[in-house]
Image (cartoon, grey):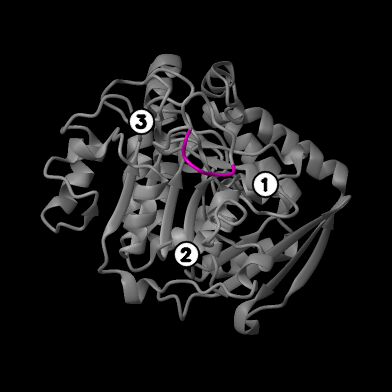
């Protein structure tokens, strides 16, 4: 179904003790509505979801993969039904079901409140065995204040799609060994692994930056600091694919701009974030302010790091600023830099090694790499949202059929795709 013909509903939420939700169908194709959910009910279901999510510690990841509700099909399905009972208004559910029985798949564009930012909306089960992703495509609306901010002009995919793809894949963070907190997220790469095979498809087109002759050469590089990223993005790019580490700011800090992206920058690199050992992260504040107050002749962040139309930040809690009342984190910085579509992580992401170590998944399975390949494939397609949703529906079907932890929503439901288009 073309984007022009697909019914689209905009769902917006606000926290004010209770959770206030409104929805409006574009072109008035169905009735709009407003709903209020008691704050205590929202807090209970949000707490239940958070308890099921991976933590940032090794113990937190092990717990999610072994005893968490998302690690078992029956408990996850119970959670999905509870989410639907709490968060899906009956009138909206009826409108969606009416389209479903007529064979029409709508697009739900959600603007969550900070309290509900980590909710995996795709998983909601309005009926046993039926998920919201089975009956609709879903994406997230960028925060309204960011979309309407003066001076921001999103780059058009139609005009830039033939430009190079900039990739930063598991860069070596100075001062951190491969098995440390900011070490390798992908492990030792070899040509036969899914992500290396996926990258090799680009080599004949000579569209990757950095340009390599062997796909393995693009992983674990030591030369991808903020200077390299600036030069490469300013030369022109269609997409940015980042796989690595993000350190999210704690919501209680009120400082979403402290979210940090880890490249290969050394500690003597100029920037706003404090050094970590021999490394200085690239913060959201850097990406927004550039060298303001740091240089005699400063440049803005968007001037130094102009973002391409489509960005994939595949890292733990890379969309963490959605949990803030004033989102000024990495997502906001990318939008401010010109991106129009960004895929981010809602929560910490278990690695393939974690699946193998804690859940005894076969060494032949690579859940994280499979997710990266699917997201990158979607971003390279004319309709990234429907392409990614189709893949997620396949994963949901596999989860329903096999109950294998490799197909658990722990990974494939972790990602939200945020767009700026109205």
User: Quarter of the image holding residue 369?
Assistant: top left
Provide the secondary structure element on which disc 3 rests.
Answer: loop
Q: Are marks 2 and 3 in contact (CB under 8 Å)?
A: no
Which of the 4 quarters of the picture holds residue 385?
Answer: bottom left
Q: Are marks 2 and 1 in contact (CB under 8 Å)?
A: no
- Frontmost of labels 2 and 3 is 2
Residue designated by label 3: 172
The chief SS type of the magenta part is: loop
What residue lies at 16% left-to-right and 33% top-to-bottom? 191
Residue 21 position within the rendered picture, expressed as x and y whole percent measured from the top left? 77, 61
SS at mark 2 in the image: helix
Residue at x 55% of width, y 57% of height = 296
How crowded is the residue under tag 1: few (<14 C-alpha within 10 Å), some, or many (20+)? many
Q: Classify mark 3: residues with Cα within 10 Å, few (<14), some (14-19) or many (20+).
A: many
Would you place residue 191 above or below residue 126 in this image? above
Return the residue nearer the eye: 329 or 79: 329
In the rendered structure, find residue 314 and report the number of the disc placed on it: none
Which stretch is magenta? 268-272
Residue hosting label 1: 256
Q: How far, Cα to Cα, is label 1 from label 3?
A: 25 Å
Give the answer, above or below, for where 73 lies relative to 376.
above
User: Does residue 239 appear in the picture of this structure?
Assistant: yes
Q: Residue most toward the bottom?
A: 27
């Amino acid at each position: 179904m073309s984007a022009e013909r697909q019914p689209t509903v905009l769902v917006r939420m606000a926290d004010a003790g209770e959770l206030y939700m409104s929805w409006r169908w574009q072109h008035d194709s169905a009735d709009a509505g407003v709903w209020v959910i008691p704050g205590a009910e929202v807090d209970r279901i949000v707490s239940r979801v958070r308890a099921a999510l991976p933590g940032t510690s090794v113990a937190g990841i092990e717990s999610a993969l072994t005893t968490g509700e998302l690690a078992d099909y029956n408990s996850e399905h119970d959670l999905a039904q509870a989410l639907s009972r709490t968060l899906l208004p009956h009138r909206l559910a009826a409108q969606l079901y009416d389209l479903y029985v007529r064979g029409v798949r709508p697009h739900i564009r959600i603007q969550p409140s900070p309290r509900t930012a980590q909710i995996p909306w795709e998983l909601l089960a309005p009926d046993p065995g039926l998920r919201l992703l089975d009956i609709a495509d879903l994406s997230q609306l960028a925060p309204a204040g960011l979309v309407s901010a003066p001076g921001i002009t999103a780059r058009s995919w139609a005009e830039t799609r033939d430009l190079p793809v900039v990739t930063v894949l598991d860069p070596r963070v100075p001062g951190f060994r491969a098995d440390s907190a900011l070490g390798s997220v992908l492990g030792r790469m070899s040509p036969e692994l899914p992500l290396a095979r996926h990258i090799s498809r680009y080599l004949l087109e000579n569209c990757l930056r950095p340009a390599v002759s062997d796909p393995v050469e693009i992983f674990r590089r030591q030369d991808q600091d903020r200077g390299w990223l600036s030069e490469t993005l300013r030369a022109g790019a269609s997409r940015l694919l980042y796989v690595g580490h993000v350190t999210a700011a704690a919501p209680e800090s009120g400082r979403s701009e402290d979210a940090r992206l880890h490249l290969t920058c050394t500690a003597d690199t100029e920037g706003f974030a404090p050094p970590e050992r021999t490394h200085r992260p690239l913060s959201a504040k850097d990406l927004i302010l550039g060298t303001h107050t740091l240089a005699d002749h400063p440049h803005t962040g968007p001037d130094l790091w102009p973002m391409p139309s489509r960005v994939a930040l595949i890292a733990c809690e890379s969309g963490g600023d959605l949990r803030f009342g004033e989102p000024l984190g990495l997502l906001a910085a990318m939008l401010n830099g010109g991106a129009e579509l960004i895929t981010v992580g809602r929560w910490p992401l278990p690695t393939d090694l974690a699946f193998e170590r804690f859940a005894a998944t076969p060494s032949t399975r690579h859940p994280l790499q499979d997710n990266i390949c699917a997201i990158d494939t979607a971003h390279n397609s004319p309709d990234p949202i429907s392409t990614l949703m189709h893949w997620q529906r396949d994963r949901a079907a596999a989860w329903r059929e096999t109950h294998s932890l490799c197909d658990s929503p722990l990974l494939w439901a972790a990602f939200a795709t945020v767009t700026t288009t109205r």
